[in-house]
Amino acid sequence: MKPPPQRAEGAGPFTTRVTWQRPEGDTVVWESRPARRRGTLAVRGPGEAAARPRTADAEALGRLRRLNGIASAAFVIGGALFALGAAVAQSGRGTAESTAIYFAGGLFFNTGGYVSLLQVLNAPRHTPPDGRLTTPAWRWWGYEPMRLDWLGTFALFVGTLVFGVNLLDSFLQGLTAQQANRLVWTPDVIGCLLFLLSGHLAFVEICHRPRPCLRSRSLGWWVVAVNQFGSVLFMVSALAAFTRPATGSLVDAGVDDWGTLCGALCFSVGGVLQAYERP
């Protein structure tokens, strides 16, 4: 028997949307983000004008709700703590207090990054040609570099870990300008780059092409867009935090604090929006 016709879309070697025909004549559309966030794919019967969602089983949907709730709460709290740390730094009440608040926020970002990776590893998988979503066995870790959603969330998780190195090194006292740039500033910039990479890959997953697109009616698009704007502000903050070797002062302490504050609030808003992107 010949397999039903299929059309795959994506960027490069990555597939983010698959459309295929079932033997009964239904058209089934699997998209990466709706499948792993909401546990759905779209089915349109012959002659039907609009597609109807087909959901995964109850076990998968419950799993997705729990993971999404943990991830969204972690980013809301982590972003709020980062914003509070930036506000404390601006008030001039000392760096030790703000560093401790940043570190606490970083732990929540670590949690959100890892749970985002768990969402990918444990999301329902599509099984053409019958057009069903099946629930895989639970995994705490997996290596799937040929999946775009895995790469994006892996970059996000590693970025949170690198930020952790930056935050730990921030507790060190008496650093020279060169030491501060090597131990504190460099991990900060690397973490920002990984966040930006993760956001770009998330846009590719939603847009099914290498360049970003505008999908104003898509909640997932808004989640990615708000978080990516926060990542841009984090990068601006990181660049302003470079310590000049000649003077030992930052490039611009005000931009550093304000960039961190506004970027962190973006992640909190993104976490709130993510709470609604669930089954």
Image (cartoon, grey):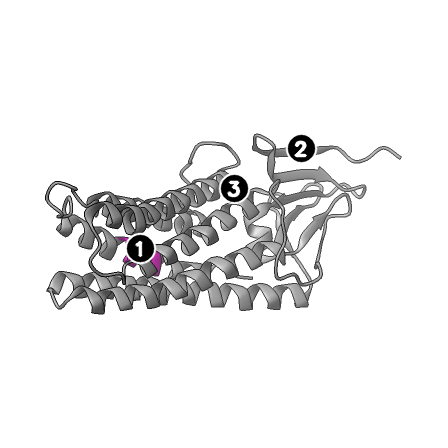
Q: Which mark is residue 7?
A: 2
Q: Which mark is residue 266?
A: 1
Residue carrying label 3? 205
Q: Earlier in the sequence, mark 3 or mark 2?
A: 2
Nearest to the observer: residue 167 or residue 274: 167
Q: Secondary structure at mark 1?
A: helix
Percent x, y of residue 133: 70, 54
From this viewpoint, is residue 188 visible? yes
Range of residues picked out in magenta: 263-268
Name the kind of residue labelled 1 in the image: Cys
Local packing at callout 2 (Cα closer than 10 Å; few below 14, some 14-19, many 20+) is: few
Report the residue at 21% width, 44% height from top: 242
Name the kind of residue labelled 2 in the image: Arg
Q: Which quadrant is home to the N terminus?
A: top right
Give the main secondary structure of the magenta stretch: helix
Local packing at callout 3 (Cα closer than 10 Å; few below 14, some 14-19, many 20+) is: many
